Image: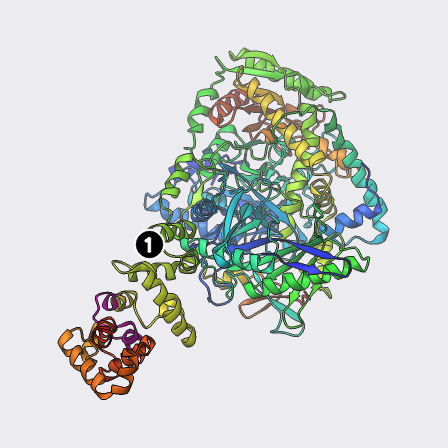
Amino acid sequence: MSYLIEGRTGQWEVVVGLEVHAQVISNAKLFSGASTEFGKGPNENVSLVDAAMPGMLPVINEMAIEQAVRTGLGLRAVINRHSVFERKNYFYADLPQGYQISQFLHPIVGEGIVTLDLDGGESRDIGIERLHLEQDAGKSIHDRDPRRTMIDLNRSGVALMEIVSKPDIRTPEEAGAYLRKLRAIVRYLGTCDGNMEEGSMRADVNVSVRPLGETELRTRVEVKNVNSIRFVMQAIEIEAERQVEAWEDGEEIIQETRLFDPNRGETRPMRSKEFAHDYRYFPDPDLLPVRLEEDYIAAIKKTLPELPDDKKARLIKDLGLSPYDASVLVADRETAAYFETAAKGRDAKQVANWLTTNLFGALNKRGVGIDESPVTAEDLGALVGLIEDGTISSKIAKDVFEDMLETGKAPGAIVEEKGLKQITDSGAIEAIVDQVIADNPGQADEVRGGNEKAIGWFVGQVMKASQGKANPGQVNQLLKAKLLG
Amino acid sequence: MSLNEDDVRKIAFLARIRVDEARLAPLADELNNIVGWVEQLSEVDTNGIAPMTSAVDIVTPLRKDVVNDGDKVEDILANAPDREGPFFAVPKVVE
Amino acid sequence: MSTQKHWTIAAAADALAKGEVSSRELTDQHIKAIEDNRILNAFITESFDVARERADASDARRAKGDVAGPMDGVPIAMKDLFCTEGVRTTAASHILENFVPRYESTVSGKLRDAGSVMLGKANLDEFAMGSANITSYFGSVKNPWTPKGANADLVPGGSSGGSVAAVSGGVAIAATGTDTGGSIRQPASFTGLVGMKPTYGRCSRWGVVAFASSLDQAGPIAHTVEDAAIMFEAMAGYDPKDSTSLDMPVPDCRAAVAAGAGGDAKGLRVGIPKEYTLDGMPADIQKLWDQGVTWLKDMGAEIKDVSLPHTKYALPTYYIVAPAEASSNLARYDGVRYGLRVPGGSLDEMYELTRAEGFGDEVQRRIMIGTYVLSAGYYDAYYVKAQQVRTLIANDFKSVFNDVDVVLTPTAPSAAFAKGEKMDDPIAMYLNDVFTVPASLAGLPAMSVPGGLDANGLPLGLQLISGVCQEETLFRAAAALEHAAGFTAKAGDAS
């Protein structure tokens, strides 16, 4: 896949790296015993530590460490046995300590890999630079008072994982695929809920451009806090085009932070002060280095679920699915689980087909996710089972499926109630075939005269006469025998 | 390394301490006096010496992932210089 | 009721146990003394209601035969760096002038649970930054000691100046202090008291207003080594809320004191570091140090010359590390959630005006030095370098403690000086801590024990330093030294 910007002076390549902030799933905050629960009243989830009262001290939540290690393992990354929390010093109204406790020189997780699933079943590896733990800040609310900003510290101190990619991404689509894959991985692992709308996953996008063929990286611009995959893709496109235009106009791109405005379709510089970027990192003297034992890491490794890449490989190898179908099915944990339940003991390809076309179509129409599907995985499997054992035809199955969507009933019950069971009694089918031939002598002669294609018309008539219940294979066979002898 | 008025202005801003223009030069002198004095450390050979960041040689304690704090809005806001209901209030921030 | 002016904890515990005095009587006696000696400016906030309430509760416990220990009922002063629930806590700063915590620091909580009676919050240098208690927003503290034949007001030392003034002035039986670079030991030396800084991590820092996190350590200030041991045992102990707290039992220091109290230093190996001899050190101090060596030798100690080669770099190292940590620790005083706020048109303006008005000159100076040494381009040259030198200083001690049990030095390079001296030259002021800072950097326990009086009749202390967590050894040596010195002088004797 290539994505190049056609400039006046030639073609430009886009270079993108992503910094994703993923909220760790944990009960309590990174350094305090206050809850991380979403939707509580202002400042209710705040301890004295989170409010940075004088003399308050941080103590690391073991779950944050475990989740970071788990995520690192899921990213096939190096887990650092020694990591250090440092203070990132800056003033902001929703940063109570006057510094954020983060990791800088010694992050808990080092280099790893995310494999992208691209169109046509292709894949491509994006490097992970690092993953580190840090505290979230509180929330500033600007629209409650014309003169004042309100501060809610509920999020202050919630554990975040900052996952930094290498500048390996070359297209907006790859950025989208990267975020979807990263989200799938953390969801499989249960380390982050991946919900970008609620802000539990946020992305900063580093964008630079260079003439095709140039090997040096040019100055990058950071586009901050883009809160959906679609916006990330748009922001890259818009920012890259801005940069190409600037370079071609002979302007210099400066290293800066910009905000993406989806309404205006532009990025614009954040108001930033001179000297604003001296964070004066130093190891937090209130905390000691984190040391992890090999055994601890191995124990977490043992509890890892099968991750999307492994699952995809297995579905292709063991169940014979196409790479495309497999990557669609593993894209999120719920779909994969649904598929595996439905496919148990059934024709996996047929189940995959029903799931990706019929069920997804129906869910999309209803605007619901697979977790809210009116058809259970067991019932979808049962439906495919009825087709497999010849109880109903594929055509009847579609009607049964519509019924299942409406009523939530099991397919067997619907077939029974409505008498949709396929007619496989050859005597009964023969009677209908004979009748149809007798009723249509002209067409019969045509077939006998060598127009074998017209046999299809007879199949249709027989199916119609049987209200669709006749086994189409048997009908075909009988017609051929009787008309072509 | 010697600090000039610009350096002091920059440091004062980083530290968010307002320093009158007239105070910059004398403050630069005071700070230079101290900085010049601590610079005697440069004569110590520290090649290959690990920096000491804590006076204790113990393993980091970890807390259990248990919610046992919070729900003390009044304790949190009791000393606030300005508040609006359950919020702290600050001068309008423009992003 | 006893008319004895200077109670010790041990004597008070004894009198309380015998029913010779009630906690309420002791407390009222000390409240009266505070009221009569307000000229000392030893307290920022008096908490007499709290004191009387706790004294009554103590007496009620005692009546039921339910005594919490030797501190039960004993009136003490609390350095105003410990957050105390419902009692204003200022760190001697304008920026916390009206701060009333809704929580109790671990150490003050332990002392409360041990039954002690808090008389009030003792004055100190602003945010514990100082060596003379002249940087307090609430005014300087007067040393109860006066030089022979002169009428000058002396500083009490710092930063725990209010604590030592309260104890040496006879208005509190003992006091808490905190020591970052000598803030317990140097003022104890200036006022003829025992001041002890425990091993870093012994006393929880939770709820103590932070100055420099890797150095701050709470400890007792008292009349005697025994009192210091009693109070240390009540203050120390593992706290899961402090990640740097030591998870090990508190040693039986009172037993150690008993072992040394008769003047027994047999088998004790005492190191005398040659690098602690300074050019221009007052003769009285050298004399007292020599005397200390003789005392210990006479009591059976083995004296060894040792070398701590990086000693001269301790002070500059400290003046990089401590301000760096302080610049970050004090960032939370921003006028948003508590403390002073000076209105400004923008958030940044509010910050700048608040912090310019809320912090005094010395605090501002240290914040700026700390900001500078951490800033881009200077971090490696200053901060990392200083932390490397700190490793060397700690290593010096480690190797010395292979050969000796304690190190004996003077506590401070001078006796208490007059207010107004050394005020214009920060570095001259910093030199007060030249002997105390090395142990702070290495996290070692150390204690100042009163040794004698100088020619002006002012007290001088001797410092003992022991290895990490070797508080028992420290207390035993200190008790022996105390016995030999036989220091009984009290403030006001000379005048």
> In the figure, residue A235 lies in which quadrant?
bottom right
> In the figure, residue A442 lies in which quadrant?
bottom left
Q: Residues within 10 Å of mark 1 (few under 14, many from 20)?
A: some
| Relative image position of residue C165 (x, y in whole percent) | 62, 39
Q: Which residue is tagged 1?
A: A319
| Foreground pick, A300 / A356 | A356
Q: Does residue C26 lie above or below A96 as drawn?
A: above
Taking the spot 20% from the left edge, 80% from the top edge, the residue there is A433
Q: Does any portion of residue A251 appear in the rendered image?
A: yes
Task: Label the magenta part by its dominant secondary structure.
Answer: helix
Q: Does residue C452 lie above or below C213 as drawn?
A: above
Q: Amino acid at mark 1?
A: Leu
**The N terminus of chain A lies in quadrant:** bottom right
Q: Does any portion of residue A93 appear in the rendered image?
A: no
Q: Residue furthest left?
A: A427
| Relative image position of residue C105 (x, y in whole percent) | 50, 47
**The C terminus of chain A lies in quadrant:** bottom left
Q: Is residue C305 left or right of residue A256?
A: left
Q: Is residue B62 left or right of residue C467?
A: left
Tell me which segment is drawn in magenta: A385-409
Q: Residue furthest front?
A: A449
Q: Does residue C292 lie above or below C416 as drawn?
A: above
Q: Which of the chains bears the disc numbered 1?
A: A
